[in-house]
Image: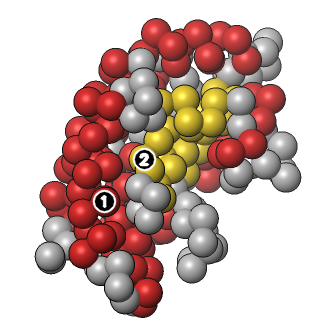
Amino acid sequence: MQFDYDYCRSLFYRSLNDAISERSDEIRSLEAKYRTSWCSGLGGLSLDVLPWWPMVTLSFRTAEDDKREIRYSPADWKGYQFISEVNAEKAIAPALDYVDRMYKSVSDDPARCQEINHLIYLAAADALLDPSVAKLLQSCNAKASVIENQLPYREFAWFEYIVVDVDKVFNLNYCQLICANRVSQRLVGRVIV
C-alpha cells in the first residue's frame, strides 16, 4: 500500500476540525478551569499519534502543566487524551483507520515502520498547523495563533502546537519542523535539504 501524504493530511485535518467542533464546550470549560489572571488556561495542543497502537488523540497542555519537565510530555498533562476515540469516535476514526492501515502494511519491516511513522507525523503536524484549526481553538477561548510561513517564536510562547515521535527517532516537535520548512520555502523558494 502506497502512503499518500495529501490524503493523510486531509484525514487529520478533517478529524481535528470535527473533533474540536464536537467537543468545543468541554474545551472552553477546560480553558476556564485553568485560566489565571495573567494567562490563558490552555498553553498547547498535542496531536498524539501512535501508529503501532493505533492511537490518535488530542491532549491539551493547561497553564498548570507549563513546567519544563513535562512541557513535551502529554501523558503528564491535566488535559491528556482530552479528545480521543472514546469521546469523539466518529471524528477521530478516519485518521485513525488510515494510520492503522499504513502501519500494518509495513509492520514486518522495522525500517519501513519508522519511515511511515515519520510521514504520518509530518502530515499530522501539517494538519494541526492549518489556520482553520487555530480559528476553531480561538472560538474555544484558546490563545492559539495562526501559523503560516513565519517564524513562530512569539506565537509558540502563548500557545504551542505539538506532534512528537514518542520513540524519538527524530527528537523534535514536528510542528516546528513544518514551520521551519515553510519559512525556508518563503525565503529561498524551496525546502532546504
Measure how far apart labels 1 and 2 are at the Cα level. Answer: 9 Å
> To which residue does mark 2 refer?
56
Q: Secondary structure at mark 1?
A: helix
Q: Secondary structure at mark 2?
A: strand
Three-letter code for the amino acid on which mark 2 is drawn? Val
Q: Position of residue 71 (x, y in %)?
A: 74, 48
Count of numbered circles in the view: 2
Q: Residues within 10 Å of mark 1 (few under 14, many from 20)?
A: many
Would residue 20 appear left or right of 175 to someone viewing this image? left
Between 119 and 68, which is closer to the camera in this rendering? 119
Three-letter code for the amino acid on which mark 1 is drawn? Val
> To which residue does mark 1 refer?
99
Residue drawn at the location 69% of the way across and 53% of the way down: 72
Quarter of the rendering occupied by the N terminus: bottom left
Quarter of the rendering occupied by the C terminus: bottom left
Is any part of residue 147 visible from this angle?
no
Q: Position of residue 145 (x, y in %)?
A: 49, 36
Above or below — where is 148 with respect to 112? above
Residue drawn at the location 18% of the way across and 61% of the way down: 6
Above or below — where is 130 with respect to 84? below
Above or below — where is 29 with respect to 67? above
Q: Dots 1 and 2: beta carbons under 8 Å?
A: yes
Residue drawn at the location 79% of the way across and 48% of the way down: 70
Is any part of residue 22 visible from this angle?
yes
